[in-house]
Amino acid sequence: MKKLSLITWVVAGALLMTLMAFVSQKEAGLSGAWQTGTDAEKMTTIYAGPYFAKAVYSKTEFQYTAGGFWKMENGQLTETYEFHSKDPDMVGKSVSQQASIKKGKLVAGNDQKITWTRLDDGTPGQLAGAWLITGRVHNGEVSRSTPGVRKTMKILSGTRFQWIAYNTETKEFLGTGGGNYTTIDGKYVENIDFFSRDNSRVGASLSFDFGIENDDWNHSGLSSKGDPLNEIWTRREKLDNK
């Protein structure tokens, strides 16, 4: 009985530690979208799975974007950059800072603390996550490709989206845009808050048909230029875990 009791306690302890780690990760609660700043200049960050993207912009000007991978351990938020439009030398580097969530606010920073307001917790959008473009449909024919060092990623929280085109080998930034979105009755609608290539697109709304099948997002409609598009996006975690 004593041996059985000891085994029981060991198993219970292991389960408790696993549960505590899970709860700790949940309490870290970064998944979703956050915002800081004012209308004069604001920064939004999307955390989706192990990926993140942040953008700094105003109503009249896009400033910069950066993103890559993140983790939260023992009150330290570490972000490793895969792209950085303002400082390409940051690509491949990691930055750690103290971070905590209190009363729905994210407080992050070492010497200078910045307070972030939560925009959503990853809901209610059906497309929350990170996606890489893997195919296009033209005249009914599907052309598929495997992302390499040149990537076009779209990262979404429950209400926010951002797409980024970049090259991890050359550290080249190629473009980005983002804002808020909805997914209702098979329609994916983007409302653009910033666009690095053409600020005149800010304020525009674009509506697309969408569907998800086997971790592929089928996305069709008209581009911001009015050109027809039919794209296939695949969940990035699926591709990274191959």
Image (tube, grey):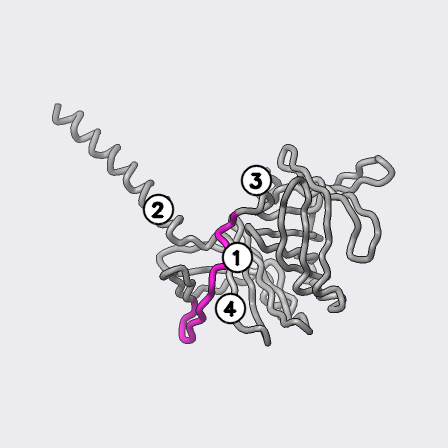
Of the numbered discs in the image, which one, if any, rests on residue 33? 1
For disc 2, the marked residue is 23
Amino acid bearing label 2: Val
Amino acid bearing label 3: Asn
**Quadrant of image for the N terminus:** top left
State the CA–CA distance, disc 3 to disc 4. 33 Å
Question: Marks 2 and 3: in contact by CB < 8 Å?
Answer: no
Residue, far left: 2
Q: Residues within 10 Å of mark 3 (few under 14, many from 20)?
A: few
Ranked by sequence position, the earlier of labels 2 and 1 is: 2
Mark whose residue sits in front, 2 or 4: 4
State the CA–CA distance, disc 3 to disc 1. 24 Å
- x, y (%) of residue 212? 65, 37
Mark whose residue sits in front, 3 or 2: 2
Asked if residue 51 lies in the magenta stretch, the reply is: no
Mark whose residue sits in front, 3 or 4: 4
- x, y (%) of residue 101? 39, 60
Instruction: Give the residue at x 62% y 41%.
Output: 239
For disc 4, the marked residue is 36
**Image height check: is 20 above or below 75?**
above
Give the magenta-colored segment's residue range: 108-123
**Quadrant of image for the C terminus:** top right
